[in-house]
Image (tube, rainbow, N blue to C red):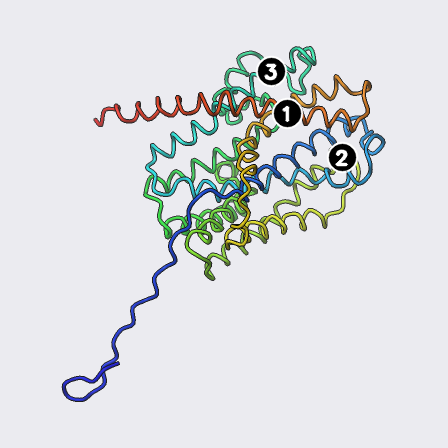
Amino acid sequence: MSAGPAGDVIVEPVAPAPAPAPRRGRLPALDGMRFVAATVVMLHHLVIAPYAWHGTTGKVFHPLLVATTAYGFLGVEFFFLISGFVICMSSWGRSLGQFFTSRVTRLYPAYWAAMAVTTLVVWYVADGNATVKLSKWDRLVNLTMFQEPLNIADVDTVYWTLWVEMRFYLLFAIVVFLGVTYRRVLAFCVLWSVAAILVTAVGNSEAQYLLVPNSAPFFVAGIAFYLMHRNGPNVILWGVIGFSFAVGQHNVIQRWQGTEDIMRHKMPEAPVHIAVTVFFVLMAALALGWLDRINWGFLTTLGALTYPVYLLHCEAGWALVRALRGHYNANLVVAMVVAWVFLVAWLIHVLVEKRLAPRLGTLVKKSFATMPRD
């Protein structure tokens, strides 16, 4: 405030406070969350499914183990939350070509290797007796990761989540094409959330297939948590997250009911909602920087194993369980299969992801660089 020539008071404009600087860098706590999500899904499939088919789960495992791993299917929702955060973080400042390259090199090499291992294990350990029968041509199409829209069964049942993720990438690619900015990303979150509900309300099955309304709230919340991590919290971001939390709690009931059918007995509903709440609280803690002090190096290694662990554990794990069941204690069988999954996942990470992925990335980048412009 100052006096003008005539003695009147002039109020000088106050410059707005600068926005907080974006926070960058590796997040070991996030890697740890990814690994936990993969592990609980794996335990759910190895403890519950092989024995639930015969109605013997509760007879061979401790009730507490059964009660906790029964809800391991919710690790998928945790994955979707984390994926929204990671994809938004990794796409910032990238062109569409760079975004495409990063997704190809991240997804396909480990996927191809896991497919090969799963096929070999099922063939040699289970005499080709997989839970789903596939022709060699079906397996060839599975290499594209686009088998579901072609109505072809997955080589491994857990691959269904990859197509959900793929649709998220295709939708988010629109933002990347326009240029990733805070406001565009926030607009994407709001528009996707509303559109997902509207297409469900009107019963448009084609739009529902594209917009994945059951999973959208978790991806959207993950994106909003990244915006909060990058630039700080505000009421709009909390509103987006709160909206996603409410809708996600509603949507997850259908998954709980499907798991009850597999388990062949009633499961309390409350733990489902408690688990989803814990996922959101953990992501909020990460976004607000409360977990920044967790910088243990081994978490980064575990995070790197997450994707191959997820790809490997199910169909091949079931084949190994069937081969070992009856010869060893059920708990020992699960421990041996889990150890096998971790070992092979590590080998895929070291021999395939670290060596093949960079070479594939170089080839894709070279293709973009030499591509004619007209």
- Residue plotted at (55% across, 49% down): 283
Question: Which of labels 1 and 3 is toward the front?
Answer: 1
- Residue plotted at (39% across, 38% down): 173
Q: Relative to 205, is 61 on the left or the right?
A: right
Identify which amino acid the numbered label 2 is placed on. Met
| Dot 1 alpha-carbon crowd within 10 angstroms: few under 14, some 14 to 19, many 20 or more | many
Residue 363: which quarter of the image?
Answer: top left
* Percent x, y of residue 179: 32, 43
Please indicate, yes or no, whether residue 295 appears anywhere in the rendered image.
yes
Q: Residue 151, relative to residue 161: is it above or below? A: above
Question: CA separation, marks 2 and 3?
Answer: 27 Å
The disc, 1 or 3, on the residue closer to the chain's N-terminal end is: 3
Question: Which of labels 2 and 1 is toward the front?
Answer: 1
Identify which amino acid the numbered label 3 is placed on. Thr
Return the residue found at the far right. 59
Q: Which residue is mark 3?
A: 119
Task: For mark 1, give the secondary structure.
Answer: helix
Q: Which residue is mark 2?
A: 263
* Percent x, y of residue 4: 17, 84
Question: Which of labels 2 and 3 is toward the front?
Answer: 3
Between residue 167 and residue 202, name the one nearer to us.
167
The disc, 2 or 3, on the residue closer to the chain's N-terminal end is: 3
Q: Relative to 119, is 44 on the left or the right?
A: right
Q: Which residue is mark 1?
A: 341
Question: CA separation, marks 2 and 1?
Answer: 24 Å
- Residue plotted at (59% across, 48% down): 248
